[in-house]
Amino acid sequence: MRFIVALHMMTMWASVARTRAFLLARSTRGTLVTSRSMSNDIEEQIKIKGDQIRQLKSDGVDKETLEPYIAELLALKTQLPSDEAPAAVATATKTKKQSPPKQNQQRKNEPQPELSNSELRQIRLQKVQAMRDAGINPFEYTFDVSHTASRLTALYQDKLEPGEEDSSGVTIATAGRILTRRVFGKLAFFTIQDETGILQLQLDQNRLADNFQTLKDWTDGGDIIGVTGTMRRTDKGELTLWCNSWQMLTKALLPLPDKFHGLQDVTKRYRQRHVDLIVNSNVKDTFRKRAQISSQIRRFLDDRGFLEMDTPVLNSVPGGAEAKPFETYHNALDLELTMRIATELHLKRLIIGGFEKVYEMGRIFRNEGISTRHNPEFTSIELYQAYADYHDMMDLTEELVCELALKVCGSLTVPYGEHQISFERPWRRVTMHDIVKERMKFDFAELQEFDEASLAKARAAAAAAGVPDVASLPTVGQILNACFEELCEPECIQPTFVIDYPVEVSPLAKPHRTKAGLTERFELFAVGREHANSFSELTDPVDQRIRFEAQAAKKAAGDEEACDVDEDFLQALEQGMPPTGGLGIGIDRLVMLLTNSASIRDVIAFPLLKPE
Amino acid sequence: MTEEGEELSKNALKKKLKAEKAAAAKAEKEAKRAAEAANNPKAENEEEMDPSQFKANREAAVKALKENGEDPYPHKFHVDYRLPDYCEEFMSKTEDGEHLDTSVSIAGRIVSVRGQGKLYFYDIRGDGAKVQVMSGLQMYAEGEEAFHKIHHKLKRGDIIGVKGFPGKSKKGELSIFPTYIELLSPCLHMLPFAKGDSNLGGITNMETRYRQRYLDLIVNNDVRNTFIVRSQVINGIRKYLDDRHFIEVETPMMNMIPGGAVARPFVTYHNDLSMDLYLRIAPELYLKMLVIGGLDRVYELGRQFRNEGIDLTHNPEFTTLEFYMAYADYNDLMTMCEEMVSGMVKQITGSYKIKYVPKPGAKEIEIDFEPPFKRIPMMEGLEEAMKDKLPELDDPEVEEKLIAILAKHGVECTPPHTTARLLDALVGEFLESDIINPTFITEHPQIMSPLAKYHRTKKHLTERFELFVAGRELANAYTELNDPAVQYELFLEQAKASSAGDDEAMITDDGFVTALEHGLPPTGGFGLGVDRFTMFLTNKNNIKEVLLFPAMKPTDDQLDFLAKNKAKRAEDRS
């Protein structure tokens, strides 16, 4: 929560016409919010409003249009519980009084609108030289941190009265990047940010002696410093590290970006992810959650006896999915290679080899356009379990995602955009026939005969429902699938297993044990997107060859996503593969869902972007 | 198979053509035999049968089953116990010659068949364990006809499901006494005999083993263990770092600029964006950008790609660990390296001391991973080993002097003769090759280490170390260079080396310098070769042994197929 509030403080800081004293006081409050009780309701509204403003900014709305929204945000903030607001106001007046114009060092050194980055860089380079001249290394080698910011916040949560200093004799050493810098004559307050949070520092002439002057001369926002000191609570009740010493660890040559503009330019955020991470703490949170999700998935599977395997990225024959591969070339072997579009065929070979539960979480590559849902490289997990079928896989998917939601989000209900997504089990399981029937009032299941008459009926029904390009689809199954994708998929908001897919669109799935023309396959949908794909795996090599041949025919007819007949894989299947359930989950999309992220670029640290 | 991956010479080409001819003739013969076999499904002794005849028989049998309305590939068989769990559960609960009266279900692959008439014995294997199936007519629930039918159907290699009573044979072998057996997936090929299951044994042909890893795994039990150890190594690394609050991240494998190491990259093409992309050779620069962004402790375990030849220690794709830790330096990293590497050796093998055969045919040696590891500063170590003085690194004639030293000691170095390459040749000759127990070679010259930080006291050197074990580099780490001006200079030097013909010099990355200008905290960075580490722990001297599907030159059939496809595509385009 602290991150979010700190963020909005920054937003506000940037958007209100730099009435610095007031805003500085507000911005430092971010460090303390966790220890205060704040009305959740208002906080939530502030958050929504903040999101709205950010969205508008990223849409490139001009300043005038934004102003009413910002005014609303400020109005909301004044409604924060009364024990908070007066404190802030009091701080504001006090700060104003205490800071004669001359002492506003930061303003003097960084009148941001006037100086370009390269000019600022020059000033900072001069400071680097000044430090070197004084025998001080502006790029230190190491620093021993005794406590992180969040650890200190937790340790001192209910300790120390306002104005009290920790007298237990504990000396704290910590380090971080300077976010804000307020200097008043012989006293300064900085906030620094480390990986875990934000901490306020009190630095003064009394304790630092000559080093106080160098602090004023050499530091800028964005620098990384190390400090030692003791904890105290200020008169206003803010937890503060009262420093005995400070040390420059890394001099930053570029300032932190102006938050207002930083937030506005979305592609710049992706292109300079390091800056995005410094400025937007919620971004850091997303990647921390992403790490937790991967780690929890591994733990979940390891606990169930699955083994993680590494299969090749570079293949001479692509396969395992319908997608266009990247091609590359191995010089020494004089060999053309393709990058994997799935891990399926190799993992199945391992099941044939006698590993009964295997998985691989890894990068997959598809040579397709980029969008908010597609990055040419993405992460998937595929798992295979011998003696299981697609029913078992549905149970496993439910268990896994519920555990993730609980461990990572702390709840089975998570917000996504305007929706609340509930992972409460059991999730809806519906056949593709039924879900399409609900929407179209036409039952594909009644088309028992696979003949021209059925095809004509299917085409007519789909065309009447407004599904485009049905004339070009050669089979009933493909028309059914097109109807589903066009009409039903976007409406699957809550987690839904759509099951029993037509065989024509499922070249690696086993025929359904009772329904002709269908396979034992499901896909998981939520928020209108596919999240998982699974089948009872096709184990019959004769049938697999027929499916491959159908694919090869499609490829010959110009479908670049279709695959060839994979003789090696067929040979492996002939060795006998046990009945097996397989499951693939798109990790990026799952992370989007669990972190309420709108674009795949929000969950990939360095997404591929068009060159500038 | 040209392991070294050099281009095909004329001779090799001739050989290849000849081999292709022979293969074609062989295929024809086989096809003929298979056709004959199909016409003659009655076989006398299946284990002595011709493989293609065996396959034809099995295909015919499977087809007959399907026509008969029986499903040779059922969808699901419920399993109560994995075979290792079955062994653990019932080994102590059963008496010789007796069985329990609660029924359980298990499944596995038949690796041996004995018996006839009213009693059949099978050994089934699954997940590394073996259980005997003792199927008697009396116990079989569905009666005599069903009993004979199922046993007539089953062949060695088939996957079966068994429902029955856990017990032991009179000889004390853990078994299951079936009331029901189901064929789950027939094996159409004659299965090679498993090692240890009979006197015949195992697959020894390397080509077959790597190309058909599933067969290797079915018949060679120790292969499975190699990959379990590999899995333990990866889990061990994750646990060590997660316990220390590192977070795992994923950075791009496809980049516009290949950076972070010196190596030849793979290049590919993004159709939609119409641009070339390079497969990563190291994740280093991205991970440092994340530390700049405030993720103080990050790591990535993942695939790297280098467009180089294949040999005993090189595969075009391989797995590394890289971690970065803010406020740490190379001294901290040496301690962590000792903890992590030794800790895993101890935990996985039970001892700090391991046996290792460094090269095929070499004598087995013992390697002692007990920390602390020996430390050898590179320049001092070299002078001591050579009994010779090295020139100062800022000597304008340093290259000439080094060339003279190389000549004196008979050490060769392929051009271009840059200081870095000359020194590297000496280190390879005098330091690396003598190392057996884990040893840190430290403080490399800056000129060999463009991303490492200049040493805090020693001029021209860096705060870097490499860990060597049995003559092989296992890890590489340094205090990270975080002064953007110095980094920029070093990139420029690399560019100069590159234009001088060193095509392994690093490429300048302006984006990275800009990122450094935002301030990288003092940071220690560490890289470990996961495949190589696994090789030590499993006593393998060929990297292919620790990769499930190592890169192989395509077979003639595959080449043929690829060529055909390519021709077809070209035709389509025109």
Image (cartoon, coloured by chain):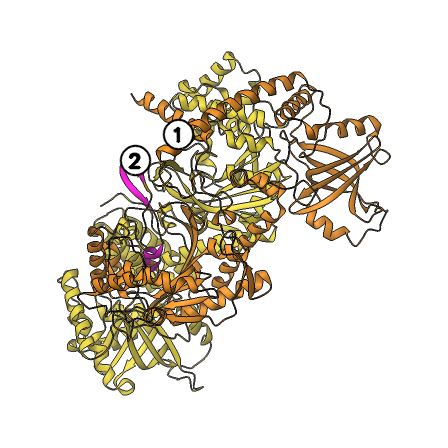
User: Callout 1: helix, strand or loop?
Assistant: helix
The kind of residue tagged 2 is Asp
The kind of residue tagged 1 is Lys
Q: Residue B275: image x %, image y %? A: 27, 39
Q: Which chain did the renderer colour orange?
A: B
Chain of residue at mark 1:
B
Q: Residue at x 80, y 53 (%)?
A: B93
User: Callout 2: helix, strand or loop?
Assistant: loop
Question: Chain A's shade in the image?
Answer: yellow
Write down the residue under mark 2: B272
Q: Which residues are magenta?
A: B268-289
* Crowd band around label 1 with a 10 angstrom C-alpha radius: few (<14), some (14–19), many (20+): few
Whether residue B480 appears in magenta in the rendering, the answer is no
> Cβ–Cβ below 8 Å for labels 1 and 2?
no
Q: Residue A226: image x %, image y %? A: 32, 75
Q: Residue furthest top?
A: A453
* Residue B447 shows up from this direction: yes
Residue A414 vs residue B287, the one in the foreground: B287
* Residue B518 shows up from this direction: no
Q: In the rendered view, would you say B324 is above or below A535?
A: below
Q: Residue A15: image x %, image y %? A: 24, 59
Q: Residue at x 61, y 50 (%)?
A: A305
Left or right: A121 with respect to B505? left
* Crowd band around label 2 with a 10 angstrom C-alpha radius: few (<14), some (14–19), many (20+): few
**Eye-nearest disc, 1 or 2:** 1
Residue A293 vs residue A85, the one in the foreground: A293
Left or right: B54 with respect to A208? right
Write down the residue under mark 1: B14
